[in-house]
Image (cartoon, grey):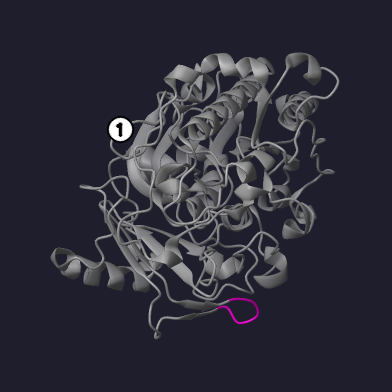
Amino acid sequence: MEFKAFRILLVFMCSARVCFARKNVLFLMVDDLRPQIEPYSGEHFPSSVSPPMITSNLTALASKSLLLQRAYVQQAVCTPSRASLLTGRRPETTRVHKLETYFRDVGGNFTTIPQHFKQNGYTSVGIGKIFHPGVASGYDDPLSWSEPYFHGVLNHEGKTRMWRAVPENDLKSKPLRDRQITDKAIRKLRDLAPNVLSGDNNFFLAVGFHKPHEPFVFPESFLDYYPEELINLPSNRYAPRKMPEVAWSKFSGLREYGDMAAANASGEIGTTLPDSLVKELRRAYYCAVTWIDSLVGEILIELETLGLSDNTIISFIGDHGYHLGEHGEWGKRNNFELSTHAPMMIRIPGLTDAGVQSDQLVEFVDLFPTIVEAAGLDTVLQCPEDSSDIELCHEGMSMLPLIENPKVPIKTASFSQAKSPYPGYGRYMGYTMRTVRYRYTEWPIFRDDPYYITRWDATLAGVELYDHDDDPDENFNRAHDKAYQCIREDLSKRLRSGWRNAVVVQPE
């Protein structure tokens, strides 16, 4: 089928019961989720967890979705990543590089995904963690929503321990926050269903889960999924050889927890936690992931029960990846594969029912144009070089061609970045490019607010080159190896030429 004709089908897709011009959107997001969950497997997933994480509901969703096996965020920190993917613009445009920055204050009055659906007549509802809460989003970006925002109440969490398995009896009167978010989402679907089924309205419902973000807190019963004796250590527990210090994320937040401080979790390069504690934390993370999977399953069952599945796009993403002791790292805030690589799947009724898997490179800025087109709204144009005064545009590209041709690339590289958090290196920004084979990173001087200037003409604080064919765990920095000098020169040119020159033009 020609792609132009394929696109036309999206606007007039009919279910078994009724023909709809537009589709609803259920937008699901999980915090700090690695892509090493059940639906994902194979050569593109180094440092696999052991035992595999159990996510049966996401596996079922993936079987009816476009599963993007190689999706990369634009910055592996909560606020920058969410601001980027929700506006469809890269951190250099949003100017959001840290937790406290609100994109409308520093970047521009950019239209977000939920705001765009609201402006097109949808009821736009936000529940849980979609934008980073508080000042970082102007308190959940009110322009994006049709109704008051819902967060839920924080229960059973504190700074004494990095993880906690909460006894079931303690959850009856004080449910965990993600439990509250799930119950609210189910109630909201029930409220929305009558108007949707009568053809009076469409919805954009965004549901954001806080876990498995630390502290790893979950119902005690989920420990049964992962017996202690089955938990293994990561295979690469130390920083890559010849890694520049500027690339390191110290993750000082680890020491905020009493048990981590007691274990002398300094976060310094070349250090690691005791084996028993590493296993303990990995097990707790797995349990939190499986618990969130169960909550996602409840929402998907309710969507089906209400008769909304045939006309609802389901988008599922993590906001970035997460280290579980690999390289001695805990968390994200860096440019390594395990931080920038995150899960992404999109179910489009009538088009992905049989399941489509693609290992082509995609980016989280691609989500905006993809969901808009899949829902039947007019195409949003790609941004020009300077879009600071343009409210509606994006800096990605539609991933819909991958449904028809999952093996044909839509871009030759993905681009991410990280502001160096390592002490003494706060003035550097790491720009990284992931190609099919390589990850290449340069660390130039960067002047943040109010300048936002990258000094490409100055001496770099570090260069990294990882060859994923030989080193999928990124343990050996080849940037200074003579055998890789020609490759480094080529990758440097491609990195500096930017994302626009990595786009593969699709046929009309």
Q: Give, as a single range, the part of the protein colored magenta.
A: 448-452
Quadrant for residue 335, please give it.
bottom left
Q: Where does residue 86 sit, x and y in percent of width and height?
A: 61, 53
Quadrant for residue 433, please give it.
bottom left
Q: Is residue 19 visible?
A: no
Q: Is residue 375 above or below residue 369?
A: above
Residue shown at the point (50%, 38%) measured from the top left: 10
Q: Where does residue 266 sit, x and y in percent of width and height?
A: 55, 52
Residue in the foreground of this view, choosing between 506 and 483: 483
Q: Is residue 498 above or below residue 401?
A: below
For this view, does 59 lie left or right of residue 165? Answer: left
Residue shown at the point (80%, 19%) measured from the top left: 170
For this view, does 389 lie left or right of residue 342? Answer: right
Q: Is residue 491 above or below residue 218?
A: below
Residue shown at the point (79%, 54%) measured from the top left: 139
* SS majority, magenta: loop
Q: Is residue 163 visible?
A: yes
Q: Is residue 376 magenta?
A: no
Residue in the foreground of this view, choosing between 380 and 396: 396
Q: Identify residue for label 1.
A: 42
**For the residue marked with disc 1, what is the amino acid?**
Gly
Residue shown at the point (42%, 24%) measured from the top left: 52
Which quadrant of the figure contains the C terminus? bottom left
Q: Where does residue 112 sit, x and y in percent of width and height?
A: 65, 55
Specify few, some or many for label 1: CA neighbours under 10 Å numbering under 14, 14-19, or 20 or more. Answer: few
Quadrant for residue 487, please give it.
bottom left
Q: Is residue 451 magenta?
A: yes
Q: Where does residue 402 sit, x and y in percent of width and height?
A: 37, 42
Which quadrant of the figure contains the N terminus? top left
